[in-house]
Amino acid sequence: MKNIFLTVFFIVTNSFAHQIENFSSKPVLASLQDLQDINAPIWASDKTTGVAFTYLTPELQFQLQSQSHRKGKCGGFEVLPPTEAFDMNSILKEFEKLKKIHLKNQADLKGPVQFKTIQHQAFIEEALSRVQATQLQEMITWLSSFKSRNEMSKEPNAHVIQMKNKAEAWLQTWPGKWKSELIDHTSTKQKSLKITLLGQTKPDEIIVLGGHHDSTSYWGGNSGAPGADDNASGSSNLLEILRVLTEQKPSERTIEFMWYAAEESGLLGSAEIAKTYQSQKKDVIAVLQLDMTSYPGSGEMTIANITDFTTPWLHDLMKQLNQLYVGLKIVDDECGYACSDHASWYRQGYSTVVPFESTSEKMNPDIHSTADVVSPQLSFRHSAAITQLSLAFALELANSEQRSF
């Protein structure tokens, strides 16, 4: 553990811990540099991954989110469940686990491992042709018409229930086995939505496509938070992929769609789900995260591949799929720890990938405000291309033997 640096404050006692809880501080993992920049107390950190553990007061949380926007990032912290709050041994173990994953990924990038070359498949090409930009526009407009989709809003699940109803209507005529469910959480009253398309021959092997359905604004949970780009866009991409898949035959592997609760409050929904999957030893082959896809800040049809806290073999697969089917320009970029829900899965040891709307420094400047609405600044053609890439990803992996080595 020579790369782990632990600072112990003499004031850390049981009474102080209770006092922190009374002031609504949150135990979190976040970028070490970001926490240092806002002068947050660092309780433990790992220099290899650049991740640190601290407690965020509401004031520090606001500072961290504001700073993330200035740096061209979104989010930036993962709230730990109460059971992990004051167990320093478990925090150190998490750092060791993250470091092990990080070092393996770095080794994979340097070789000599060669990633598998894939071939063009007509059924994937045909499925991609069914993605409709107009359908995405309608969906994003609909989701952003809710005053707020924040976990603290008066009706935090109203939109989730309607999304579930919409998905179930498409699935009525699909010939495969499927399941629709709302997932309750201990850390938030908001629910996650999960749709499962059961695989025909390898149902225990799972491909996860996810994105958060909540929204937020600087003015709090009950203010206007339309969240058109963040993240009605990613949520709508998932709905469109599901719609197209209901027109296809069932895949060999299981495909699970996840619309996560309360990402904006610290990845609350995805953190619980990913930890549950890991504890149940579920065989998740890959996790793709869609968070903001409609603002072409780096130019239309130019997107980012997030390389930190994601997995090299999936970067390679996504770029091959793009060359075969879509034709986007993909630029490698970083977004820092816990910039979206993929971090929850990565921390549990699963392979992750994130195609993002632009490079971080050119992402949508209106997110987390009342200005994040459907406007001419958004490109539904751009978002449709990311939808096609994600659909190709799902169909390729769900009908192959590929997995992490």
Image (cartoon, grey):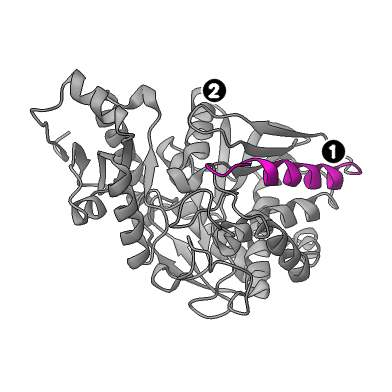
Outermost residue on the top side: it is: 14
Residue at 57% in and 64% down: 229
Q: Are marks 1 and 2 in contact (CB under 8 Å)?
A: no
Percent position of residue 404, x then y: 50, 43
Residue 137 can be seen, yes or no: yes
What type is the residue that disc 2 sits on? Gln
> Relative to 383, is 125 on the left or the right?
right
> Relative to 113, is 186 on the left or the right?
right
**Quarter location, residue 146:** bottom right
Q: Residue under label 1, please give it.
A: 176
**Quarter location, residue 235:** bottom right
**Image height check: is 381 above or below 319?**
below
Mark 2 secondary-structure assignment: loop
How far apart are the alpha carbons under marks 1 and 2? 25 Å
Q: Which residues are magenta?
A: 152-173
Report crowding for label 2: few under 14, some 14 to 19, many 20 or more residues within 10 A (C-alpha): few
Q: Residue under label 2, please give it.
A: 280
Residue 399 colored in magenta in the image: no
